[in-house]
Image (cartoon, rainbow, N blue to C red):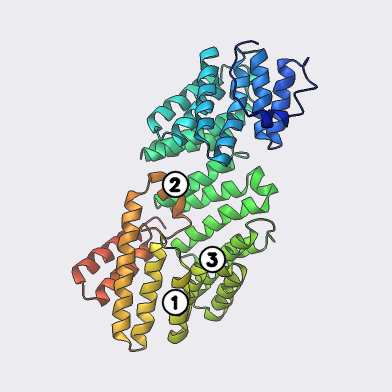
Amino acid sequence: MKQGYLILFSIGQLAALCICAAAQNETAEDWYKKGRDLGRNGSYEEAVFAYNRAIELEPNNATFYTAIVPNLNMLAFTTNNQSMRNESLKAIDKALEIDPKNPIAWEQKGSMLYYQTKRYNESLEAYDKAIENISSYRQDIHANQTEFLSFIWTSKSISLWQLMRYNESLEAVDKAVQIDPAGNYDAWAFKGELLAYLGRYNESLQAFEGAAATEAASSQPEIKSLPWAAEGYVLMQLGRYEEADLTYQKIIGLNLTGEGANRRLANAWRGRGNALAKLRDYNESLQAFDKAIELTAENAAYAWTGKGDALRDAGRYDESVKAYDKALELFPEHADAVIARAQKGRGDSLTKLGKRDEALAAYSAAVEASNRAISAFNNATPLDRAVSFTFDPYPLDGEFWHNRALALHALGRESEADAAYAEANGLRKSEI
């Protein structure tokens, strides 16, 4: 037997692989093609076995090592098996030992350094090596050179963002969309999220439109709904409520089906509810929130909070308190930013009902929840902050700080309230 790079399986697993017995005379290329087809079908263990057979027959072919890596990574992900990740790193290093300029191996190394070890500076070096070598490399290294190069620039942008090198990150993602404007959905979407995080809302809207126009979004309604949802959020931040409502209506009009459809539709109905409440169309707003609650009853805490806000603003304070109470029953513990919003709303309604002691307790709970939210935000990675920003009201949202200020004011904590008002006003000076 030739010395190769072999992942060992149990006797039972090997016996299950019918591809072995009838293929004793097959070439390394035959095994490589088997591995490729098996991997595409989601048969990752069998694919790894086939690639190992190819490697055994041709141990100095770098392509076989780079081909086995995605399958090992999928096995590591689905089984939470760290040894598979280690084998994946070994395969990448072996590919680079054989072929030091292999751009696929360098891209894989960058991804492993980023995702597995959080070594962001080293991941940048690997991505730069991939970019440096791809242009002069043979054309068959990847099925689509343009797509692959754009993907590497997107990955580089993400690493730069984690290092808080924001301008360079945006330059990198700009390069990604310039290279493959019609194909790279992820680059457009990531660009939109980063710009929104930086308060550059009008530019972020353009990026989300770019994402919605990509081939993936055009052919798959469930993907198209995602940048539209982000657009709706940004339009709400800009106070363009009519446009936000129309954007959420577009999502509803996609007639989404399949896994996750109800959740996406519920989010769109909730977005409509928030926009309509801002427009003081409370009856339509409440109907929208009820539709969101109907679609995802067990995960409807955000919709119940929005409904509570609409009922409060409509002067229906008893019903409002009940809606906030329902939201607080359903919220997961970590949703502190929105728990703060619900408790502040409860305090408002209880004040109107003359229940001052209960109102003060609610305001106090709102401040405590907002403290936790601020702490969690400060401890999050830059990327987690950016990617979450267009979907959850993190403490970069002016409304969050305004609500905090009102709660502190109600508690008589004026100096803290003034600081929160100042923070809210600063955030609301974002580009309009």
Q: Is residue 207 above or below residue 231?
A: above
Quadrant of the image occupied by residue 186: top right
Horizontal relation, residue 118 to residue 147: left or right: left
Indicate left or right for 20 with 10 as reference.
right
Q: Of discs 1 and 2, which sits in the foreground? A: 1
Q: Are marks 3 and 1 in contact (CB under 8 Å)?
A: no
The location of residue 283, given as percent across then percent down, is 55, 81
User: If the image is split into quadrants, where does the C terminus sit?
Assistant: bottom left
Whichever of callouts 3 and 2 sits on the residue coming sooner in the sequence is 2
Q: Nearer the viewer, residue 374 or 231?
A: 374
Residue that badge 2 annotates? 194
Query: In x, y percent, where is residue 346?
Result: 38, 78
Q: Give the answer, above or below, for where 371 lies relative to 306.
A: above
The residue positioned 63% from the left and 29% from the top of the image is 10
Which element type, helix, strand or loop, lies under badge 3? helix
- Give the answer, above or below, for where 155 lies relative to 52: below
| Residue occupying image coordinates x 34% and y 69% | 403
The circle on residue 325 is 1
Q: Which residue is mark 3?
A: 299
Q: Amino acid at mark 2?
A: Leu
> How many discs mark residues in the rendered view?
3
Q: Earlier in the sequence, mark 1 or mark 2?
A: 2
Q: Give the residue displayed 24% in from the left and 76% down from the top.
A: 411
How far apart marks 3 and 1 lie (CA) works out to 14 Å
Residue 109: percent from the left, percent from the top?
49, 26
